[in-house]
Structures are given as structure tokens and as C-alpha cells.
Image (cartoon, rainbow, N blue to C red):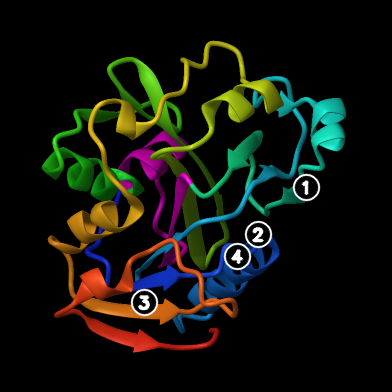
Amino acid sequence: MGRAVQVAELFVLTCSTDPSFNLELEERMFELAERKELPYTVRFWVNRTCLVKGKTKSEKYGWYDERLANELGIRVYERSTGGGVVYHDLGNLNWSVYAALDKWSFLSPVRVFEEHSRFIVEALSQLGYSVRFAPPNRLELEGHKVSGMAARSSVRALLVHGTLLVNADLRALNELCVPPPSSPKVENLCRWRPTDHTEIVLSVLKRNPKKIWVIPSYDNFSPFVIERFEGYDLRFIRNL
């Protein structure tokens, strides 16, 4: 039987938009979850413009226009999860879930994505978006894809992460990315209602504890408006 989605005990806001830093931190937090040194945790993060590819190239996952990426100078990074290539920029909110597991905890891949994206669906619903989970690993709004997910697991831990198109450059995304077969058209949430990363995170926090770790960037830039988190238990740390 599948286990119920837990309420997050910890939230992490990563202010750096450096893709290398954010992807390295993804691995570090997964390792902490494996060692049971991290509670059930949700992280929000944003990358500057780049492409991020999965571990394995496959037509069923989609790919990207390698010639155009080279011409435009778009860097391509690799993540540890499966799936195809995703486009990131400052209008794309990324979220990750880290959970320690025991060897008796089993969920089908589709259930993993559905259960661990439920908090995003509920938060967006509170903001007026009729988002729903669509198998195998995406969130849709009126037939448009607004989020895609990928995952990895071991006998000790699970990582599920996804993108959320808030106000991304869809022209660049569509020119660079080759979607998998039968994938619906992508669209930004802002097509239906103006929003930003901070509003979405605050909507998630309404149903969860107020403990937040903030990892500031070294250039003092943040994709989140920290002042809007007044009243929350913020702890500023340099790294994990």
C-alpha cells in the first residue's frame, strides 16, 4: 500500500540562481535524506537560463535542439533523475521533495508523482488555478502542461522534483526543447492569472509548518521577496 503524503517538516528557499550550485545541492540533500539527517523536506529554487537533461537520452522523454543551444550559448547541465530535457529561466519555479524511506515503502511511479505533487496542486487551487495531475508525471491546466516532474529513489530515500511555468520565456522553451510524443502544449500560469514565485510559496506554507531555511545568494539577488515572509521562522544558512 502507498503511504500518505506527509506534511513537510522543513522548507528550504535557495536564493542562488546558479544551476551548478542548485543541482549540487539537490544531490547533497538527497544524501542527507538517505542518512536520515533530513526530515520530510520541500525546497524551492530558481535557475537562470539553461537546459537540464536527464540521465538517459530517449525519444519517449524528448530532447533538445543541440545546434540551436550551441548557437545561443545556452549551457546544458545534467541531473541525477530520469526524463528528458527541461528549460529553466527566472520565470520557472522549481520544487523538490526529499523523503527518507524504509525498504517496505512502495509506490508505483505514477503514484509517486501524484502524491508528492499534491501540495503544489492544493496551493495553486487556493490561488484560483484549476490544476490537476495528469499521468504519468505532469500537472495540467485546461489541457496545457504547466509542470513536469522527474524522480530517483534508493532503498533509503526518495527525491521528486518538478518545474512550474510561472512566467517563463515560452518562445525560447519551444524553440530549444523537443517534447516527448503526445505531450500537450506548455503554458505559463500567468496566462490565467498574474502571480509570482513568492505568492506560490506562501500559498504552500499556509497549510504547512512555518520553519524555513533560507540559503542566500552571494550576489545578493533573490528570486523570492524575503520581506513577504514576515512572521515565519526564518533561519539563514550558507549551505547544508
Q: Earlier in the sequence, mark 1 or mark 3?
A: 3
**Could you say which disc has been placed on residue 22 in the image?**
4
The CA distance from mark 4 to mark 3 is 19 Å
Q: From the viewer's perspective, tell me whether residue 23 is left or right of residue 132.
A: right
Q: Which residues are magenta?
A: 91-115
Q: Which kind of residue does numbered mark 1 sit on?
A: Arg
The CA distance from mark 4 to mark 1 is 14 Å
Q: Secondary structure at mark 2?
A: helix
The image quadrant that residue 20 belongs to is bottom right
The CA distance from mark 2 to mark 4 is 5 Å
For the residue pair 213 and 74, the one nearer the viewer reads as 74
Instruction: Tell me the residue that label 3 is attached to.
Output: 39
Furthest residue toward top? 182
Q: Position of residue 58 (x, y in %)?
A: 74, 26
- The reply to whether the C-beta atoms of the residues labelled 2 and 4 are less than 8 Å apart is yes
- The reply to whether the C-beta atoms of the residues labelled 4 and 3 are less than 8 Å apart is no
Residue 203 in sight here: yes
For the residue pair 3 and 48, the one nearer the viewer reads as 48
Q: Earlier in the sequence, mark 4 or mark 3?
A: 4
State which mark lies toward you, 4 or 3: 4
Q: Which kind of residue does numbered mark 2 sit on?
A: Pro
State which mark lies toward you, 3 or 2: 2
Instruction: Tell me the residue that label 1 is attached to.
Output: 75
Q: Earlier in the sequence, mark 4 or mark 1?
A: 4
Q: Position of residue 181 (x, y in %)?
A: 60, 13
Could you classify mark 2 by the number of other residues whose Cα lies within 10 Å: few (under 14), some (14-19), or many (20 or more)? many
Disc tally is 4
Could you tell me which residue is drawn at 34 percent across and 88 percent down? 235
Residue 83 in sight here: no
